[in-house]
Image (tube, rainbow, N blue to C red):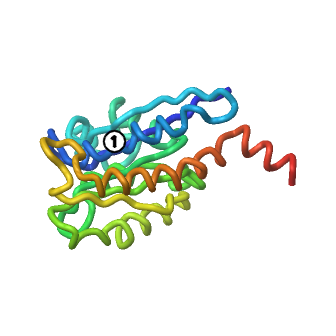
Amino acid sequence: MSNISLVAVSGSLHAPSKTTALSRELLERFAEALAGSPGGHEVDTRLIELSEIGREFSGALTRDELGPVAEEAVRAIEQSTLLIVASPVYRASFTGLFKHVFDFVGQYALIDKPVQLAATGGSNRHALIIEHQFRPLFSFFQALTLPIGVYASDGDFVDYRVASEQLHERIGQAVQRGAPVVRGTLPDRVSEYVSNW
C-alpha cells in the first residue's frame, strides 16, 4: 500500500497570499475527497510556498546546482500523486520564479500525472491564463491536466481566506471532476485495469 501524496505549489512571491490561500483550500478539499479511496491509502499533503523557499532556486542554472532544500522540493513535485499548481497573474503569465522551478523538473517526470491548475488575479480579465499559459506548460510535460481550472480574483477573498460562494462552488466542481481521475491513476487501480484488459 502506498500513500496518496498531494503536493501544491504556490507561485506567489508574497506572504500572506491569496494564491497560497487558494492552493491550501484546493489541497484540503482534495485530501477530504481522496481520504476514502479504495485500497486503504493514506493521504499526505504538502504546500510548497515559493515565497518561503524561492531563494533556494536563485542562481542555479542546472539541477545539480540546486541545494538540498530546492532539490527536495523538486523531488516532491515529481513524486506526487496529484500536483496542484497556482500562480498570481504577473505580466500576463505565471511568475518567473514559478516557471524557473519547473525548469528543473524532469522532462518525463510528470507523464500522466494529474495536475490541478489554478491562478489568481486582480480581476476576471485574466481568467484565461489557465488555458493560455498553464495548460501548454503541463502539456509539454505530458501531464494529465484536470478538466476544471480554478481562477480567483481579489473579490473572492477576505483577509486572505476564500470567501465567495462562487469560488467555493468552482473549487467543489474541480474536486468532484478531478478526484475520480486521481483515483484512476493509483497503483492498485492501474493494476486492476491492466489485469482486466
Local SS, label 1: helix
Residue 75 seen anywhere in this rendered image of the structure:
no
Q: Which corner quadrant of the image does residue 74 belong to? A: top left
In this rendered view, identify the residue nearer to me: 99 or 29: 29
Point out residue 8 in the picture as x, y percentages from the top left corner: 38, 42
In the rendered image, the vertical position of residue 81 relative to residue 39, given as above or below: below
Q: Which residue is pictured at 20% across the width and 47% down the height?
A: 18
Residue 184 seen anywhere in this rendered image of the structure:
yes
Q: Which residue is pictured at 38% across the width and 44% down the height?
A: 26
In this rendered view, identify the residue nearer to me: 133 or 23: 23
Q: Which corner quadrant of the image does residue 129 belong to? A: bottom left
- Give the crowd class for mark 1: few <14, some 14-19, many >=20 residues within 10 Å: some
| Rendered-image quadrant of the N terminus | top right
Q: Residue furthest front?
A: 165
Q: Which residue is pictured at 34% across the width and 38% down the height?
A: 66
In the rendered image, the vertical position of residue 71 relative to residue 176, given as above or below: above
Amino acid type, callout 1: Glu
Point out residue 139 in the picture as x, y percentages from the top left corner: 50, 65
Which residue does the numbered mark 1 point to in the structure image? 25
In this rendered view, identify the residue nearer to me: 132 or 36: 36
Residue 141 as seen in the image, left or right of residue 70: right
Point out residue 140 in the picture as x, y percentages from the top left corner: 49, 65
| Rendered-image quadrant of the C terminus | bottom right
Q: How many marks?
A: 1
Q: Which residue is pictured at 20% across the width and 54% down the height?
A: 156
